[in-house]
Amino acid sequence: MQRLKVEVMVVSLSASRYSHGSALHFKSRRFSSSSCSCLKVSPWRGLNEWRESPLNENRKWGEHGPGPASEPHRDSPFGQASTLAEIGSIVLSTSDPHWKSQLSHMAYSMWRRHNLPLGISKPPSRPARPPIPQLVSPKEIPAPKDSGLPLNAYMLHNLAHVELNAIDLAWDTVVRFSPYSEILGEGFFADFAHVADDESRHFSWCAQRLAELGFKYGDMPAHNLLWRECEKSSDNVAARLAVIPLVQEARGLDAGPRLVKKLVGFGDNRTSKIVARIADEEVAHVAVGVYWFASVCEKLNCAPDSTFKGFEVWLISAYLLTYTELIQTY
């Protein structure tokens, strides 16, 4: 993990500014496959193992950790959709969070098992959301003592909200950039569909544990700032990679151990183990971001560090957003 953090820190903030006329926009840029003088980024050594791992059916948290869930057999809910991009768009258009989580796993499983083509689709302008939780500004999110939830449930609810948004962020990346598959390569979409599957499993664990504690997702307000950051990068894949995996998810790696320690201190070892496992699995997601950010920069014939610095305004906003989220759990 330490090596991964060093790789992420290679692309640090500076005083440069992002310009909306940047050639990073796919629609106005011609790409070259020739080599460039890019800074070479060494992939996390566990990345290939993660990519080649079998489908993970351990969607229930048992007495001794994750295990397979006994979910009833369902016919395919995807209708005539026959490509990864099309079924990803259906996941994004699903409002019920538990069904969205299940659909996400079903979508990734179908693609893996039936070798579906990537295809091209258009994502909804915003992912469908349930009536609750009420979405409010960060200042209106209640402190733990005012939330009506004990501290462990409060933390779990915040984490469940992050994981639900992460499902949509990953699928939006797959669907939104599907027209550029010849540029990005199928591996890009395979990785982010895999990320979406992981995030759906994480949401399932959080929702299950909330129910065990007598609560559910939606029992307290949440905010929609995560999606705001996603919208800012809707037409720029390099910005999407910089803001989401390299800042927001990377900050989550730092937060995980602190949340685990807090939960242990609260006396909830079961929840602490769930959070620890989620944090451990998020390492792969940051590694995916590092790998594909470097790859996109190579296609643009530019160095990852200077490209990253060019997004400073967005990155500071994303960093502060993530920090705000983290301090809400303390």
Image (cartoon, helix red, strand yellow):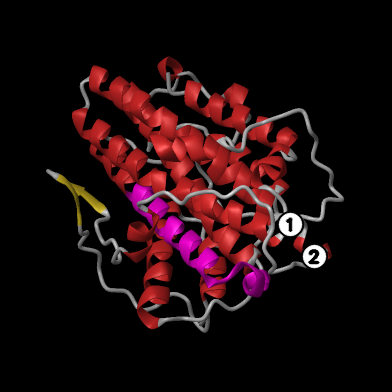
Image mark for residue 132 = none
Which quadrant of the structure image shows residue 224?
top right
Q: Residue at x 68, y 62 (%)?
A: 299
Rendering coords of residue 272 (x, y %): 26, 31
Q: Nearer the viewer, residue 134 or 43?
A: 43
Residue at numbered disc 1: 235
Amino acid carrying mark 2 in the image: Lys
Q: Is residue 186 above or below residue 68?
A: below
Q: Is residue 103 visible?
A: yes
Mark 1: few/some/many CA within 10 Å (<14, 14-19, 20+) = some
Q: Residue at x 35, y 48 (%)?
A: 202
Tag 1 secondary structure: loop
Q: Earlier in the sequence, mark 1 or mark 2?
A: 2
Rendering coords of residue 310 (x, y %): 75, 40
Amino acid carrying mark 1 in the image: Asp
- Taking the magenta stretch, the answer to whether it contains residue 181 is yes
Mark 2: few/some/many CA within 10 Å (<14, 14-19, 20+) = few
The magenta segment: 179-204
Q: Is residue 134 visible?
A: no
Rendering coords of residue 67 (x, y %): 19, 54
